[in-house]
């Protein structure tokens, strides 16, 4: 899952496809995402990305297939012939915590968390984010300070590296 995250961060087309098309369909209750959805995304993207206008038909076809393949490989959809969302999709609190710590300089409150698009890459809605955050608080990874006007997230590890070493891998590993 972490490699998928870095793939999305390094390839803006995949990132935008998941955020704009996949997450949007998932959150609206659609059953899945298809080649037609990826094709429509590419057509829409070509309107704002000048370099895409010179791509061949073959490039579009390959990219359309590649976008669906990423979803299939990561487990977001069940199969290519019937690309419905995988209802048993599970994102662990360790992966969620990794994203949180990766963005700890930006995410200081629950509002920041809810407005951060990276969590959409994992199809996490606000309720699911809150649940995973509470689980991290219970496990001693973060502290939620609700003393003020908004709930602040206090990180109990000073860095992503220490989070991974102490929580993901374990202190004695």
Image (cartoon, rainbow, N blue to C red):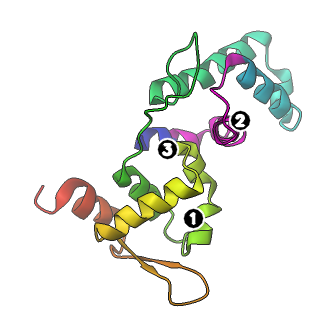
Q: Nearer the viewer, residue 102 or 24?
A: 24
Q: Write down the quadrant of residue 111 in the picture.
A: bottom right
Is residue 152 found left or right of 65 in the rendered image? left
Q: Residue at x 83, y 36 (%)?
A: 49
Residue 155, labelled with which disc? none
For mark 1, give the secondary structure. Answer: helix
> What residue does disc 2 label?
21
Residue 139 at x, y percent in the picture: 28, 66
Mark 1 nearby-residue class (10 Å; few <14, some 14–19, many ≥20): many
Part of the protein shown in magenta: 7-35
Q: Residue furthest bottom?
A: 148
Which quadrant of the view contains residue 158? bottom left
Q: Which mark is residue 6?
A: 3
Q: Is residue 99 visible?
A: yes
User: Real-space Cα distance between discs 1 and 3?
Assistant: 19 Å
Q: Nearer the viewer, residue 52 or 168?
A: 168
- The answer to whether residue 102 shows anywhere in this view is no
| Residue 146 to residue 20: above or below | below
Q: Secondary structure at mark 3?
A: helix
Please state, as top left, top right, bottom left or bottom right, where the C terminus lies in the image: bottom left
Q: Main secondary structure of the magenta part?
A: helix
Residue occupying image coordinates x 57% and y 64%: 113
Q: Along the horizontal axis of the image, is 18 left or right of 164?
A: right
Instruction: State the image coordinates of residue 106 (x, y, percent, origin top left).
Output: 57, 70
Which label sits in the foreground, 1 or 3? 1
* N-term-proximal mark, 3 vs 2: 3
Which residue sits at x=43%, y=54%?
Answer: 96
When the figure is inspected, residue 36 is found, relative to residue 27, above or below; the finding is above
Label 2, residues with CA under 10 Å away: few <14, some 14-19, many ≥20: some
């Amino acid at each position: 899952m972490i490699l998928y995250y870095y793939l999305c961060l390094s390839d803006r087309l995949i990132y935008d496809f998941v955020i704009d098309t996949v997450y949007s369909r998932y959150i609206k209750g659609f059953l899945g995402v298809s080649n037609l959805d990826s094709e429509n995304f590419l057509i829409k993207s070509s309107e704002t990305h000048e370099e895409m206008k010179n791509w061949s038909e073959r490039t579009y076809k390959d990219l359309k297939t590649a976008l669906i393949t990423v979803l299939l490989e990561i487990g977001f959809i069940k199969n290519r012939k019937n690309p419905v969302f995988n209802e048993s999709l599970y994102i662990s609190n360790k992966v969620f915590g990794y994203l949180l710590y990766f963005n700890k300089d930006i995410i200081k409150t629950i509002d920041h968390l809810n407005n951060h698009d990276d969590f959409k890459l994992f199809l996490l809605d606000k309720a699911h984010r809150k649940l995973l955050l509470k689980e991290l608080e219970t496990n001693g990874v973060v502290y939620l300070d609700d003393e003020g006007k908004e709930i602040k997230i206090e990180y109990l590890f000073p860095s992503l590296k220490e989070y991974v070493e102490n929580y993901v891998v374990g202190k004695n590993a």
